[in-house]
Image (cartoon, grey):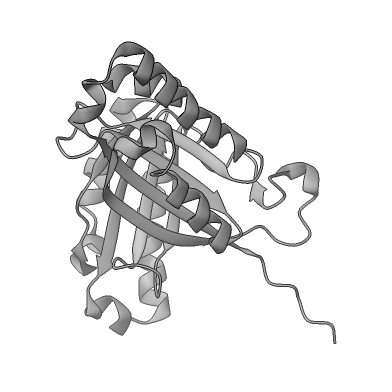
Amino acid sequence: MEKTKKPANIYSSFLFVKLQPDFRRLISNEKIAAKQEFENMVGACQEKVFLRTYMVSGLRADSDILFWRMSDDLTYLQEICARTFSTGAGKYFTPVHSFLGVNHGPEASLPKKDLDFGFLPKDTFGRYRYMLLHPVVKAHTWYELSEQEREKLMAERRLVVNRYKEIHENFFLSYGLDDQEIIVAREAKALEDLISATQELRQLRIKNYTTVDKPVFLCLGKPLTEILDAIS
């Protein structure tokens, strides 16, 4: 019997950076050149890697930008993330938070026309402007529950999210990859819906089985050029 081909893993990097004050002290022409060099490097990687940029400056004291990248090649993803700090304005970035997780890719039967980059289902990630991101570590008692009990609690959670038609959630597993166990990325078209849904989710029974769900990041999606101009 022919074995079913397993979906490819999609690796996701959430990298938060802070712009060093030294960059703001550069003369205007130096800043323009450094920003352009950095944007060119980022743009050159766009054909192979999913990228969304979010402005965090003004919402948190410790971070200015979130770079969300995804690839089915972890080695290549690592290389691209490392370049963040070696080119142009990136030389003035300080890494503050970094989260790495994996999402199971699409079934092998999914037509290529429905995929971005050859591995990413279209309209699944980075759909809305607002995103709430946070790591999760489950309590040991969660793993002591039966599969049926865990599914019941997850179903209660899905009911809440599904009531909001313009909220979309993605989960990334970090077992063996990072300190947290799960990364939750909750996207919304309207900030009011994001706040309301998050408050409802906080009250569910499943929260009793979570030991860590902080820090929490509210991120606003914007083009990289706009973010760099705003923070520099």
Q: Is residue 213 above or below residue 17?
A: below
What residue is rendered at 59% in x and 45% in y? 49
Q: How many marks?
A: 0
Residue 128 position, x and y percent, is 46, 31
What residue is rendered at 40% in x and 75% in y? 176
Of all residues shown, which one is farthest toward the top? 28
Residue 95 position, x and y percent, is 28, 47
What residue is rendered at 33% in x and 68% in y? 181
Of all residues shown, which one is farthest toward the bottom? 1
Query: Residue 173 falls in which quadrant of the image?
Result: bottom left
Q: Is residue 13 above or below residue 4?
A: above
Q: Is residue 180 left or right of residue 159?
A: left
Of all residues shown, which one is farthest toward the right? 1
Query: Residue 141 falls in which quadrant of the image?
Result: bottom left
Closer-to-camera residue (205/26): 26
Quarter in which the N terminus is drawn: bottom right
Closer-to-camera residue (35/10): 35
Asked if residue 222 shows in the view, the reply is no
Of all residues shown, which one is farthest toward the left? 61
Residue 11 position, x and y percent, is 52, 59
What residue is rendered at 49% in x and 46% in y? 69
Q: Is residue 199 above or below residue 35?
A: below
Closer-to-camera residue (196/133): 133
Quarter in which the C terminus is drawn: top left
Q: Is residue 108 left or right of residue 63?
A: right
Asked if residue 8 shows in the view, the reply is yes
Q: Is residue 44 left or right of residue 137?
A: right
Residue 215 position, x and y percent, is 20, 50
